[in-house]
Amino acid sequence: MSSVYDLGPAGGPRSQAARPTELRSWIARIESLRELQHVSGAHWDREIGAISEINYRRKPSAALLFDDIVGYPRGYRVLTGSLSNARRMAVTLGLDPGLDTIGLVQALRGKPLEWEAAAPRFEPQVLDGGQILENVVAGRDVDLSRFPAPLWHEHDGGRYIGTGVAVVTSDPDTGRINVGAYRMMIQEDGRSATINAEAGKQGRAQYDRWFAKHGKAPVLASFGHDPLLLMVAGTEVPNTISEYAYAGAMVGEKLSVVRGEVTGLPMPASAEIVVEGWIRPDRVLREGPFGEWTGYYSGSRRPVPTIDIERLYFRNDPIILGAPPGKPPNDYSYMRALLKSAMIQDELSKVGVRDVRGVWAHETGGGRLLVVVSIAQRFCGHSRQAGYIAAQCQAAAYMNRFVIVVDEDVDPMNLDEVMWAVCTRCEPAEDIDIMRKSWGSKVDPLLDNPAVPYNTRALIDACRPFEKLDTFPRVAQASPALVRETVAKWKDLFADPRFPLPESVLPSTAVSESSGGSRPAGSAPTTPVSGAEPKAPDFTDEDITGPGVSPMDRKD
Ligand SMILES: Cc1cc2nc3c(=O)[nH]c(=O)nc-3n(C[C@H](O)[C@H](O)[C@H](O)COP(=O)(O)O)c2cc1C
C-alpha cells in the first residue's frame, strides 16, 4: 500500500520492518529494539506513577511494561513511556528507528499538510469482529476496578484509567467521528468514569450539540491501543477531519475498527479495554485534582460529565496505555513538542508566512506554553506576523503563553541561544506585545476563575529590528568557517573527552532526546563540524554570518 511518505520529497526514510498496527505487536517491536523494561510487582497506589516519572527524567528514557501489579492478576498490565523518545516515535510513525530528534523533525517537515490532504483516503475499515470483543460485559456487571488503574500522583483525587485514552464521539448532524484524549477518572466504585474535556475541545463541542438536540450523547473510550492513536487523539488535528482517518494517513494504512453494540461508535478492533455508553448534561460527578502537564495539580474537584457505561469490552490480559502528565518532562511532552512544532510550522506556511526556518514548541512549556519561531526577515512587520499567527493558529492557540520570534541565526531549540537573542535583540518597551482574552484552560495555575478560562500571551520579538539589519553590530563569535578550520587543525585538543565540545558548537546528528539541543531541520545551522554538516540546510553558513554579506542582501 502506498504511503504519504512516498508522496513528496520531504518524506523521511521508511522503516525496513512493517509498522506494528496494534499495541501488542508494537510492544514486541520496541522490545526487539531494546527499548522496553519490564517491571514486576509495583503497586498501583503511587508506585507505578513514581517509577514512570523518574523514568521520564532518564536520558534516554525507556518504555515500561508493568505486570504482577499488587492486587491484580498476572497479565493485567500498564504501559508507560510509549512515546517519550525519538526511536519509539519513529517506530510508531513507521519511520526508520535510527532517526534522532533532528532526523524526525526533518522527516516530519511538511507532513501535517500532506496528512490533512490524504486523510479522506484513509477512513478506517469497519470489521465484523476483533480481539476487543474477547470479553463483553453489560450493564450492572461493569466494574472498572478489575483493571489496575494507577493513582498516578500523590495528590490526585482518584484513579485515572484514562490518560493515554482515546475518547470517541460523533457529530450529531454530519456523523463525523472525533477522537480526543481527555482524562478519565474511575467513579462510583468502578461502575462509571468521568470525562474531563476542556472548553473548546472538539469532543466536547460534539457532545454539547448532542445534548442540545437529543438530551444525551453517545460516547466510547479506549484505554489501550496502538500509541499512534494516542498521538492523534492528544494533538489538535484540524476539526474537519476524523482522527481515525488522520492516523491512517500518517502511516499510509487504514485503521481497523469495530462498531460498539450500543451506540455504533467505532472502536479500534484490537483495542485492549473499551467502555461504551451515554453522557447526559445533568449526570455529573466531581473529579480531580490531577497532576497536569503544566507541572501543577489542576485546582479543586469539579463536576464533569460521567459516562453511564452500558458495555465494557476487553481483551484477555489487557494492557492500560498510561500517559500520565506532570512537571515536564512527562509521558507525552516529547511527543507533543515534536508534533506541535511540525504542525505549527505547516500552519504558518499554509497561510503564507514566508521563510520560516524552524519552530520549536519547548518541552519545558509542555509543548504549548513556549513556542519559538525562527525566520529569515524579509520586510518590516514580518516577525510580528509570524509571532501573532504562531500564537493563535489552531495547532498552538490552546494554552500558549509565550511566542518568541528569532532571526535565522538563532537555533529555536536551544534555549540559551534563544534567551541570548531576547536579551540582546528585544527592546522590552517596543518588542513585547500582549494578546489578551486568548484560549486558556482550567489547568492554568495562574487562572483566577475557572468559569472564564481566558489566558494572556506575550509575543516577544527577539529579531534584530528590520530597519537596523544593515547597521546592527556583528555577532562577536568566530565565523563557522573559522571554527571548522580551527577544530580540524586542533583536533586532539578538542577531542579530549574530559572537556567535550557542546552540541551547539559542533552539531552532529546525535542530540538529546528530550531537550533538543540542536536546531531543527531547515533552521539555521550552528557551526558545523568538519565532515558533519547539518542535514539539508537550504542556505550556506555565509548567508547567515559570513563576512562580506550584508544582511540587506537578503531582503526583497
Ligand atoms: C495524554 C493526554 C491527556 C490529555 N488530557 C486532556 C484532558 O483531560 N482534557 C482536555 O481537554 N485535553 C486533554 N488533552 C489534550 C487534548 O487531547 C488535545 O487538545 C486534543 O487535541 C483534543 O482533541 P480534539 O482537538 O479533537 O478536541 C490531553 C492530551 C494528551 C496527549
Image (cartoon, rainbow, N blue to C red):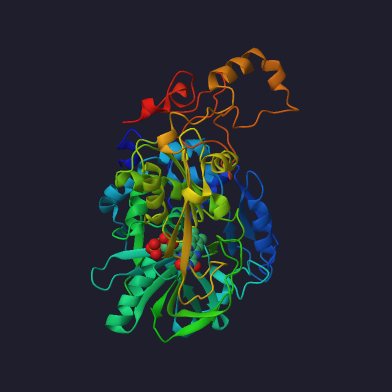
Q: Residue furthest top?
A: 489
* Residue 31 in sight in this render: yes
* Residue 272 in sight in this render: no
Res 168 quadrant in image: bottom left
Rendered-image quadrant of the C terminus: top left
Position of 141 compared to 552: left or right?
Answer: right
Question: In this picture, is 544 found above or below 247?
Answer: above
Q: Where does the image place residue 158, in percent across and percent down from the top left?
A: 60, 75
Residue sitting at 62 percent across and 16 percent down?
486
In front of the other: 90 or 508 = 508
Q: Residue furthest left?
A: 174
Residue sitting at 50 percent across and 57 percent down?
401
Question: In this picture, is 7 found above or below 485?
Answer: below
Q: Where does the image place residue 75, in percent across and percent down from the top left?
A: 60, 62
In front of the other: 517 or 370 = 370
Question: In this picture, is 40 found above or below 508?
Answer: below
Residue sitting at 63 percent across and 44 percent down?
60
Q: Where does the image place residue 141, in percent across and percent down from the top left?
A: 49, 82
Rendered-image quadrant of the N terminus: top left
Q: Where does the image place residue 43, in percent across and percent down from the top left?
A: 69, 66
Res 259 quadrant in image: bottom left
Q: How many marks?
A: 0
Position of 264 compared to 444: left or right?
Answer: left
Q: Residue furthest bottom?
A: 282
In front of the other: 475 or 176 = 475
